[in-house]
Amino acid sequence: MMKMKLQGKRALVTGASVGIGKAIARALAERGVLVAIAARRTAALEELADEIARAGHRRPVVLATDLAKRGAAADLAARAVAALGQVDILVNSAGASIVGSQWVAADGAAARELFEINYWSPLALIQALVPAMRQRKDGAVVNVTSLAGVAPWVFTGHYSSTKAALSLASETLRLELNGSGVHVLEVTPGPTETALLAGARRDVPGAGAAMAWGPRGNTETLARLVVRALERRRKAFVYPRPFCLAPLLPGVARWFMAQIQRKLDGDEARLEAAREDVGAAAGGRRLTKNRP
Ligand SMILES: NC(=O)c1ccc[n+]([C@@H]2O[C@H](COP(=O)([O-])OP(=O)(O)OC[C@H]3O[C@@H](n4cnc5c(N)ncnc54)[C@H](OP(=O)(O)O)[C@@H]3O)[C@@H](O)[C@H]2O)c1
């Protein structure tokens, strides 16, 4: 496949109010892409749009949306097409997490909402936007998954499940679009400094200690890598790079993470306290990152 020329393309970036999505939107705008930026916090989106315009690039279109609501993604896609004319690049970066053991979070409202944001919404956006890309024989879908989808961590199993599901959906989509001119890029971040990571460090037992030793990424570098991977039509990449073997050797990654988590059991009292805390979390009071 030929390299993708980004200049003049039009992109929809979800989760662009902060964090990784914001950095990707900025990096695309710097490459001459006209972007539509979506999230719930419109003030933050307007601020980003102003910043991009001040830097001399085309001002992004701001689209407010709550992707936890069924139907919102299809509506967002329609508004993005109306505002941009067409969407050449879809970036599914919006994401959230909840804290709750499997038996407490179960299939409750917070868990279902999480799947709506992290899994069903990206699929609904793909459904709305990929057919026109196929017709034009040109386009790209960028799905932001997670290393958490390779190896789970206690009390955030639902987050891992949404990301593993999106990872498999990305792989399937790539096979289905083979030869169509539509490129599928899976971006698999490990720990990257954002509000989501800060929430995990604060709310998830053992996560802070586990993260203390490993490398951590930053959003600007990750966004630069996304732009480069899009231009070169790469299928997937992991960031930070030291984690790149994890998706290739998932059994080893899971074994390693299980060893770390087994050590958590040594401190039963602390874990019990965390379990009670988690019960409250599943009631919706401490979604680590799901509130405006
Ligand atoms: N940071 C990491 O270490 C890490 C690691 C692996 C994967 N990831 C993935 O990277 C992506 C970006 O995460 P991040 O770290 O940048 O997190 P973040 O800073 O918390 O940003 C999350 C973004 O998603 C949006 N969002 C959340 N719930 C939403 C909803 N209901 N409707 C619409 N938008 C919603 C947020 O916007 P509003 O709150 O304004 O709606 C925000 O723009 C996520 O898919 C995450 O799973 C992150």
Image (cartoon, rainbow, N blue to C red):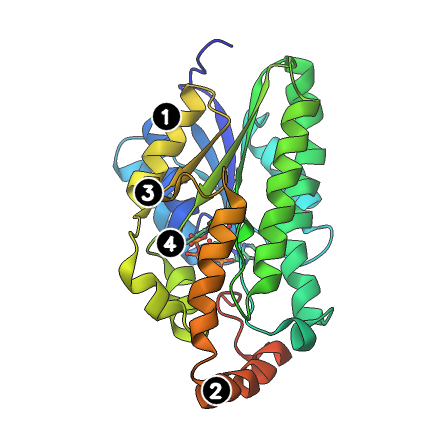
Q: Nearer the viewer, residue 99 or 266?
A: 266
CB under 8 Å between discs 4 and 3 = no
Per the model, the C-alpha gap separating discs 4 and 2 is 26 Å
Q: Which residue is mark 2?
A: 268
Q: Which residue is mark 1?
A: 228
CB under 8 Å between discs 3 and 2 = no
Residue 171 horizontal side relative to residue 261, left or right: right
The answer to whether any part of residue 10 appears in the image is yes
Please tell me in which quadrant of the rendered image residue 206 appears: bottom left
Per the model, the C-alpha gap separating discs 1 and 4 is 20 Å
Q: Residue at x 42, y 15 (%)?
A: 5
Q: Secondary structure at mark 2?
A: helix
Q: Secondary structure at mark 4?
A: loop
Say which amino acid is labelled 1.
Arg
How far across and how far down the image is residue 61, in percent? 48, 39
Q: Residue at x 32, y 37 (%)?
A: 53
Per the model, the C-alpha gap separating discs 3 and 2 is 32 Å
Q: Which residue is mark 4?
A: 191
**Closer mark to the observer between disc 4 and disc 3:** 3
CB under 8 Å between discs 2 and 1 = no
**Closer mark to the observer between disc 2 and disc 1:** 2
